[in-house]
Amino acid sequence: MSGLIIGNLTLSSKFILPAIAGFSDVMMRVLCYEYGAALCHTEMVSAKGLIYGGNRSEDLLLTDEREPIKAVQLFGSEPYFIEKAILDQRLKKFDLIDINMGCPVPKVVKNGDGSALMKDPGKAYDVMKAACDVADSRPVTVKMRAGFYQDNQNAVQICELAEKAGVSAVTIHARVRDQYYSGPINFDLIKEAKKQVGIPVIGNGEVKNLDDALEMFEKTRCDGIAVARAAIGKPHIFAELDEKPYDADIFNLMERHTRGLLAVLPEDIVANNMKRHLVSYLKGIKDAKKYKVMITRSNGIDEIFDILGKAKDELKQ
Ligand SMILES: Cc1cc2nc3c(=O)[nH]c(=O)nc-3n(C[C@H](O)[C@H](O)[C@H](O)COP(=O)(O)O)c2cc1C
């Protein structure tokens, strides 16, 4: 399958890793890129938090030279902070800026951020325009939902405003806010957006294998697909989707992911973050449940490595 063009960037395939808070860390992105992901995003970063020196912002902005394209996702609903964040020295290394208009979490929505921006198209436009005005030659993209409300699924309108503001591509997770991460995907809405705008439209929601991807392409005519949950613990999904041959040694991947993070983050943070990844990597191996419980209960990085070593030895027998 050929790639996708977003602004001044030519992507190597049609499959991207969107922002996944708590997961799309620098090593998950490195591994997804190795298996052919075309574009991988950081976890979402608060524009305001970045400016006021929020506690975790710097960790979220870590990048690696093995990332061919560095893409950051910002959230916020105040054009002033979006602008300031994009102009900040710490964001200079990013090749693409993505704006979050999809987050359903109450803490985010109550501030008017994330999916709540879709309730106010005027404000959404101001945020997108502010971002495009200061991004220089770097593409700005937007990741949205079908809409905020079930009875007002206004993604097509937001896509049109995005194009008018100068946005280079849009991703639609075709569910409304209250659906969070389950329930039917509104394929028709992605299809309609694709008809109405000239910029690339990326479909998103429940793509877990090649059949799902082909269904998404066929039903929506979208230009690309974002794959989130199916890539957690399975970076090789990108080779699978692109029908490329690949090798995936789960134990090697778990070790590289963990050691890669240990090189750049404190041990306790890595242990905590890796627990979430490891239970997904372990899916499907023999006695997965036993090891998942052990990992979840583990205390510290040494114990995690012991459990993985034990699992590897036991599986060899
Ligand atoms: C734990 C979790 C965290 C997420 N964090 C973000 C985020 O930071 N920014 C964002 O735009 N979407 C976020 N999403 C939404 C995903 O990017 C994606 O739109 C959604 O999971 C549907 O795609 P999927 O079916 O391929 O998982 C998150 C989803 C999950 C499950």
Image (cartoon, grey):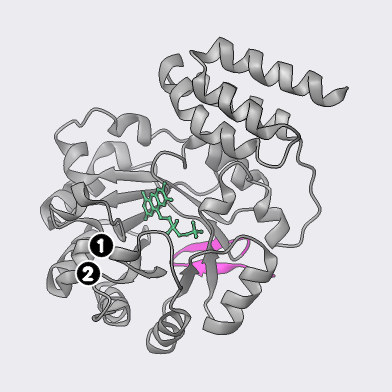
At numbered mark 1, what does the secondary structure look like: helix, strand or loop? helix
The amino acid pointed to by label 2 is Met
Q: Which residues are magenta?
A: 1-13
Give the x, y percent position of residue 315: 81, 26
**Relative to 107, is 161 above or below?**
below
Give the x, y percent position of residue 251: 72, 29
Q: Is residue 248 left or right of residue 4?
A: right
Give the x, y percent position of residue 136: 30, 57
Q: Is residue 2 visible?
A: no
Mark 1 → mark 2, Cα distance in angstroms: 6 Å
User: Residue visible at 19% across and 38% down?
Assistant: 49
**Relative to 219, is 300 above or below?**
above
Q: Residue furthest right?
A: 317
Residue matched to label 1: 115
Q: Is residue 317 left or right of residue 29?
A: right
Q: Is residue 103 left or right of residue 80?
A: right
Residue matched to label 2: 118
**Relative to 156, is 169 above or below?**
above
Give the quadrant of ligand 1: bottom left
Mark 1 closeness class: few <14, some 14–19, many ≥20 residues within 10 Å: many
User: Residue visible at 48% across and 65% down?
Assistant: 205
Kindly indicate whether the residue at mark 2 contacts the one at mark 1 (C-beta within 8 angstroms).
Answer: yes
Q: Is mark 1 within 8 Å of ligand 1?
A: no
